[in-house]
Image (cartoon, rainbow, N blue to C red):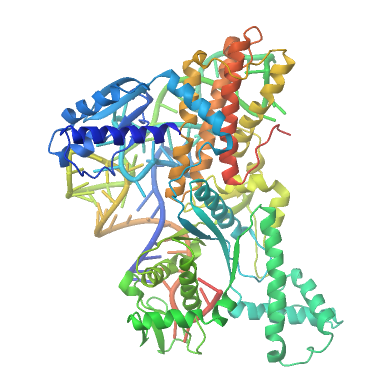
Amino acid sequence: MTLYVRFAGHMAALLDALESAGDLPAGLNRKAVTVEPPRDPSHGDLATNAAMVLAKPAGTNPRALAEKVAEHLRALDEVEEVSIAGPGFINMRLTPGTWAGELQQVAALAGDYGRSDIGDGITVNVEYVSANPTGPMHMGHCRGAVVGDALASVLAYAGHKVIREYYINDAGGQVDVLARSAHVRYREALGEAVGEIPEGLYPGDYLVPVGEKLAAEYGDKFVGAPEGDWLVLFRQTAVAMMMDMIRDDLALLGIHHDVFSSEAELQAAGKPEAAEKWLRDHDLVYDGVLEAPKGEVPDDWEPVELPLFRSTKFGDDQDRPIKKSNGSWTYFGADMAYHYQKAQNADQLIDIWGADHAGTVKRIQAAVAALTEGKARFDVKLVQMVRLLRDGEPVKMSKRAGNFVTLADVVNEVGKDVVRFTMLTRKADAQMDFDFAKVVEASKDNPVFYVQYAHARIASLGRRAQEAGVTINESPDLSRLGTAELDLIKLAAQFPRIVEGAAQNREPHRISFYLGDMAAAFHGWWNMGNDDPSARVIVVNDPEITSVRLFLARQIGQILRNGLALMGVEALSEMQ
RNA sequence: GCACCCGUAGCUCAGCUGGAUAGAGCAUCCGCCUUCUAAGCGGAUGGCCACAGGUUCGAAUCCUGUCGGGUGCACCA
């Protein structure tokens, strides 16, 4: 059991004791009680706000209550010193042995140090990427892919059951365009000079193999045939091939989804109809006419009666159509049914979306709230755009010409680990620059490098010690840990809390920031050896202190590895 | 016009789901460094947390309004 978990337990037991002694009324809400490291380390190792939070409901004053709490805390073996400060903070300093014990925990738990059970086995469905199956993945998809994947890993590590899901938008107009584009390539494969790809179709070369496959399969049967004869067939083949391509792209990033759901299949199975019926029965869908849009009204706008979902009842500013005037489902209509389906198999849902879809968040949240009757937690994480730069200059892209920067290009140029780490160096809802030059820079400014470098340094230590001829004691005497070492352990001990925070807030970037801090602290410790040879890890004439420091360094390395694993980044044993 | 995201050091960004004196890197200034792994190290300067109210023991954090930036706004996905 890790330290913070244990102290949460101490706290609960102590409050129970105060209750039964009559010092505290029973049944107080303890949710706001925390045991955390104070911001200012000079206050101590741990601090609790218990007295301040509970004093008022208990009808007493914080200092008096703090005194009683402190009394119990002083009785704990692990606690060296307790003091009451400010408005009623209770600060604790822990014994060096407690920190040494935590270090042993890292060694004992190894890859599981940081694992948590706060998820309590809850099933969370994380839907991410869900790029339209009309071409290879480009950099616009990359950040959401990485954030979603890392978030899924963090949630799993924090004790959730996680379903990684991809929604294939294979039912809308854009896949018909894909099929038509494929038809042009099909004719081309049969020897026709098709010239330039017509405006409005997908011009990319990646459809050439699709045309070839269709030609091989069907010969010239559909060359002059009406669209109705081949559209569905071509669409299916093209979508399947696009999905293969996308899966390959994702694999380059180390991303593998558990479930791929098809919008077309969802519709074929009548899921939207079922959702509509349920909503109509609950008076949440009605037939109505929307007002003309505010702001710029499109030229072809005309009032039509459509089946509308009452999203305004859930905070949206307009009711939303679930079907088009031609009778087919809107994207939203199908998506609503899709979310309902996901909610059947999961307790909580998370969608990772590009920020350009921010405007549609409310309606889908409204739909999920309606269909699950408010029972399922549902978060939409918006991921902001990434600006691609090369030496500070924006990389020009034109989607129409088909020369967008593909994900594969970027991964091939800078590597999977650099891409993944960099995508997590900013919180998801902040815009980000991705500079090809900077992300591979070997300097302190580049967190990717800095963290890897720390890990590589640690990895090299065992080797070094051996070369220096120092005999290493694998179970060293940890009472020889000094203040600088204990400070490192204190930061290391926070890793489990960071994981929990990242999981609860759905913010995987916290892991990368923490790893940056941990690496910086390690480098700082290491650099002490520059000025003072006796502060080095390897002290040739003192095998015991060398063993102690090596043990510590290895556990730091373990934590860096655990954190990097959550981000899907491999830890390097040496820098190239 | 409306909605959403954002506004923290000169710049790029953190800020642990309300805690004590708001942090890091870069830049600037001052020292040091030829090494247990080189791609540096230590220190200093720098803030009305956009602004104004409110909530409470306590606010960068929550609420309301204002200003400023970004994005999106019928049956497109």
Q: Position of residue A139 (x, y in %)?
A: 63, 58
Q: Position of residue A378 (x, y in %)?
A: 42, 61
Is the residue A93 above or below the residue A177 in the image? above
Q: Position of residue A34 (x, y in %)?
A: 32, 37
| Camera-side residue of B66 and A42 | A42
Going 42% across and 89% down the picture, which residue do you hit? A302
| Camera-side residue of A526 and B2 | A526
Going 34% across and 72% down the picture, which residue do you hit? A317
- Residue A133 horizontal side relative to residue B54, left or right: right
Q: Is residue A322 visible?
A: no
- Extreme-right residue of the structure: A191
Q: Image quadrant for the N terminus of chain A?
A: top left
Residue A248: quarter of image: bottom right
Going 35% across and 71% down the picture, which residue do you hit? A316
Q: Image quadrant for the C terminus of chain A?
A: top right
Q: Is residue A483 visible?
A: yes
Is the residue B65 above or below the residue A366 in the image? above
- Residue A441 horizontal side relative to residue A306, left or right: right
Q: Position of residue A390 (x, y in %)?
A: 66, 49
- Extreme-top residue of the structure: A541
Residue A551: quarter of image: top right
- Extreme-left residue of the structure: A59
Is the residue A55 above or below the residue B42 in the image? below
